[in-house]
């Protein structure tokens, strides 16, 4: 069984970094201003910091053309099986992997949380594959194009469990078993036993 997908890269854009730095400056100044005010100390310097952060964030946003910057799906293939992980031309044997971790958050078109009057549609580009080989950590974003791609990944997980390969699957909420949330290690082990994976 193989799972195949495309590599996702996050744009390293100076305009995006400018917006983030401005937002961070604004939040830090707001926090410090609140803390100092509760301590009975006053000062208008944090108002200047808030407005400066807001201005920097707005400039970065304007330079981007007021567009949201999303991760990019590349042409680089990611192929994972019980024996090998392949990222483009690089190959890693699974039996040499010290730690294997799948962060699976969404597939394209998946319904996300409700925001105001409608649900957000997710893009499937916020998933990550982490592993360690020879003491070196590797981290790769990957794309899930639809629900069928997520099922293919689930079939790979089932094969991992049946062959007793050590790995971890999770999402933003924490650990999962075949994409179902589990509260702790005990619940995870119980879910494995109930599914027939001892």
Image (tube, helix red, strand yellow):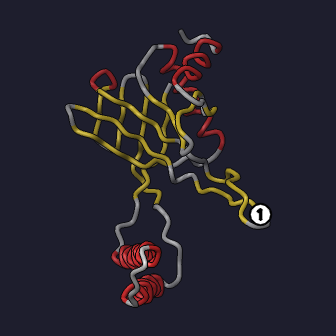
Quarter-of-image position of residue 132: top left
Q: Give percent across and percent down for residue 196.
A: 61, 10
Quarter-of-image position of residue 95: top left
Q: Give percent across and percent down for residue 12.
A: 34, 67
Disc 1 secondary structure class:
strand
Q: Residue at x 53, y 9 (%)?
A: 198
> Observer-nearest residue: 37 or 151?
37
Of all residues shown, which one is farthest toward the left? Answer: 134
Q: Give percent across and percent down for residue 191.
A: 62, 19
Please say if 198 is above or below 58.
above
Characterize the local packing of mark 1: few (<14), some (14-19) or many (20 or more) Cα atoms within 10 angstroms. Answer: few
Q: Residue at x 47, y 87 (%)?
A: 62
Quarter-of-image position of residue 45: bottom left
Q: Give percent across and percent down for residue 93.
A: 30, 26
Q: Residue at x 42, y 19 (%)?
A: 165
Q: Residue at x 52, y 20 (%)?
A: 159
> Observer-nearest residue: 118 or 184?
184
Query: Is 45 positioned to the left or the right of 177 in the image?
Result: left
Please say if 9 is above or below 67.
above
Residue on which disc 1 sits: 118
């Amino acid at each position: 069984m193989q799972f195949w997908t495309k590599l996702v890269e996050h744009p390293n854009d100076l305009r995006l970094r400018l917006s983030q730095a401005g937002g961070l400056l604004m939040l830090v100044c707001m926090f410090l201003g609140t803390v100092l005010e509760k301590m009975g100390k006053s000062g208008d310097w944090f108002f200047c910091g808030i407005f400066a952060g807001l201005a920097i964030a707005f400039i970065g946003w304007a330079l981007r053309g007021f567009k949201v910057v999303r991760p990019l799906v590349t042409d680089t293939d990611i192929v994972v099986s019980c024996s090998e992980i392949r990222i483009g031309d690089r190959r890693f044997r699974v039996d040499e992997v010290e730690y294997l971790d799948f962060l699976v958050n969404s597939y394209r078109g998946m319904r996300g949380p409700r925001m105001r009057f409608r649900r957000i549609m997710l893009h499937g580009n916020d998933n990550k594959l982490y592993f360690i080989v020879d003491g070196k950590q590797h981290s790769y974003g990957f794309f899930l194009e639809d629900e069928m791609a997520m099922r293919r990944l689930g079939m790979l997980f089932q094969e991992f469990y049946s062959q007793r390969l050590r790995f971890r699957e999770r999402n933003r909420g924490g650990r999962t078993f075949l994409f179902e949330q589990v509260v702790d290690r005990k619940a995870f082990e119980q879910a494995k036993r109930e599914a027939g994976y001892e």
